[in-house]
Amino acid sequence: MRNLNKLLLFVLIIITACDNADVTSYVDPNIGGVAPLLTTKNPTVHRPHSMIRVFPVTKPGLTDRYLSDKIYGFAVNMPAYRNGHVIELMPTTGTFSADHAVNASTYDHDLEEVHPWKHSVLLEDHNIIAEWTTTERAVIYRFDFQNKETANIVFRSNGQALFTMNDKNSVQGWEESEETRQYFYAELSRPFDTNGTITGGETASGNKEVSGRRTGAYLTFNDPSTPVEVRIGISYIDENQAKDNLIREMSGKTFEQVSEESYGIWKEALGKIYVEGGTERQLRIFYTSLYRGLERMVNISEYGRYFSGYDKKVHEDNGRPFYVDDWLWDTFRSHHPLLYLIEPEMQVDMVQSYINMYEQCGWMPTFPQFYGDFPAMIGFHSAALIWDTYQKGGTNFDVEKGYEGLKKNAMSGTMLPWRTGPMCTLDSFYIQNGWYPALPEGAEETEPMVDGFEKRQAVAVTLEHSYDDWCLAQLAKALGKNEDYEYFSKRAQNFRNVYNPGTGFMSPKMADGNWVEPFNPQLSGGIGSRMYFAENNAYIWNFNVMHDIPGLIEMMGGPESFTRRLDDLFNEPTRIAKWQFMGQFPDASGLNGMFPAGNEPSFHVPYLYNYAGKPWKTQRRISEVMEMWFDDDPLGLSGDEDGGALCSWYVFSAMGFYPVTPGNGLYAIGSPFFKKVQIKLADGKTFTVKADNVSGRNKYIQSAKLNGKPIDRAWIKHSEIMQGGRLEFIMSDRPNKEWAADPSVLFQLTEIK
């Protein structure tokens, strides 16, 4: 009995250690602060999925914010991911100047402290310590004026705005962005002595209100002997709600209490996935990636109500949060599947939000924002989001209304890139013939609705809608709509219409049924190959048939031929100088041959070796990509992060599995990075992935067990994870080419009910 008690005590200590483990120290918001080619990351302070997101404002137009010498202000909020900010404020010292550049200050990253819950910097030119922390709908800025001379705080806008000084310690107003107002209410910890307004570059001392574009207000403190705190609540409803949000979330709390509360929230959120082993570098990349994935979608409910940009009205939320800020072309692949794994109830609320948007505006959105839909990219991947969630058991939403919206998009909506609304002639052609018609390169566009830069993207549109129609077909079947199931299942095979067996590539086909010639699979199609594809060329789009991988393998000549095509993808050189190639394909970052590690159409591709009976090749490729193209410094992201898309790929891949086909309930097994991964599931269960002998060298799986029973398959079911349990791998530095070498079992297995 004594030994049993010791054993139970030991187990309790281990469990407690896991529950209390603090992984927040591994998060560095400056990772990815320098973009490889296109768009950088902000070091954003916020709470998971919170409405307010704040960061330092560096030189306007500067792509790589981390490299900026100066801070020009502090954002009150970023209402739409990677799309600027509304209202900024900046502390200064001495005689006030309305000049934006004069107010700016140099800063030093070595004197900076940055976390998801708090950020502080030294503004060297003014000798001010600036720090900030947030709740869900409010932010505290604290400015410690070291020189104790006259101090100023200036509020500014870029767009149309209103600033009103109510008394000696509060300011309120709004700024308009995309024809939608964000309201704010700011309280200062002590009264200011004088004030004024700014219009353009001119100041007006004593004015208490100003409106217009590029306006602002300034406050002056004659004796800033103690730090000045500025507490700001925001709202999309009105100024009164902004004030109410501030009072509800910060009243009676000190800066330290708010910061500590936010820290605790992040500790719990990041602790839902606990990993052991791996290097310090790998842990920093992993938990920073998880932090990035918990930024979106954004809950904009404000204590029972929300403003909807889809009908420009305020709605009751009936106890269910309303979420916006999503880029489905990017996030349906791995971001939403990751959220469902660790936050299933929240994911279901996100799905219901999409359905609310459809009811309010008449179309299923593609990139829903706070002001309405932003019709970006291609496909209608709300079908993937809704079906994947429903199929996994997340059914607590109005599925019939959701199906209605999806079917309307599929049957009546335009498929044109970066467009929304009713069909055009190209869409009618697609429904009748089964492919999006292409034009010869250089031909004059005949359809006026086509965007002059984005073009038709004819092949990529056909491929993506084939997958979306497959998702819609599965949902139709689950709802007993058998005629729709048959119809959309047939449309899901349209990818076959753009495969040219003569060249072995997905290729542009004209309206008369002939292939576009000449066609160079690497270079045809202009910038980003947008006449025919999306952001990348035919080499990577060749493998974008996620819903019928057996059919794709068959089209390419069988497993051995398919494997060679994958190998060729990773080894194909650019046929022009690399600098010229990147000029044509700036999104193709993290380039391994023609495989762009930093762009979404590539995410599932390394896992496709599993489907050809070569999982050891997947294990090698995954390890190679993760080690080469991700790092724990400002250059650490291989491409545009796109609000959780790229980082969620890393989180899944580091855990050892990935959802190749959202909607079928399966995860392809890759190569785990850590000795142990524990995923805390919503019902209190835990799923553990254990990898014995794993290291950078030992990346190959020798054998595997699930709950103690050997498995010889390179995938795992979603339902197996949600039951809790243990997946164990034995790793080595040499591949076991016999393990999971028969892919036929995979094609017979489905989670789809």
Image: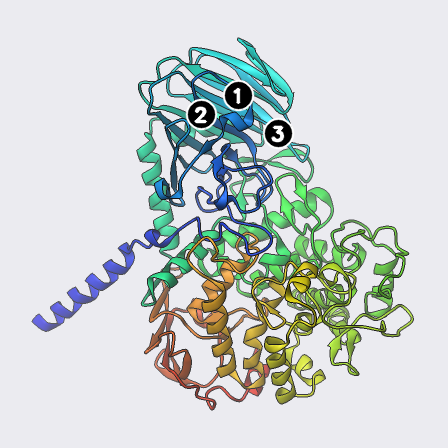
Q: Amino acid at mark 3?
A: Asn
Residue 550 in view in this figure: yes
**How far apart are labels 2 and 3 at the CA level?**
18 Å
Which numbered disc covers residue 158?
3
In the structure shown, which secondary structural element does the residue marked by tag 3 occupy?
loop
Disc 2 and disc 3 in contact, CB within 8 angstroms: no
Q: Which residue is mark 2?
A: 91
Residue 54 in view in this figure: no
Residues packed near mark 1 inside 10 Å, few (<14), some (14 to 19) or many (20 plus):
many
Pointer 2 or 3: first along the chain: 2
Instruction: Name the residue furthest top.
Output: 206
Up-down relation of residue 253 to residue 24 (above or below)? above
Residue nearer the viewer, 426 or 15: 426
**Front tag of 2 and 3:** 2
Pointer 1 or 2: first along the chain: 2
In the structure shown, which secondary structural element does the residue marked by tag 1 occupy?
strand
At 47% from the left edge and 78% from the top edge, which residue is drawn? Answer: 619
Q: Amino acid at mark 1?
A: Gln
Q: Which residue is mark 1?
A: 172
Q: Quadrant of the C terminus?
A: bottom right
Residue 471: percent from left, percent from top:
66, 66
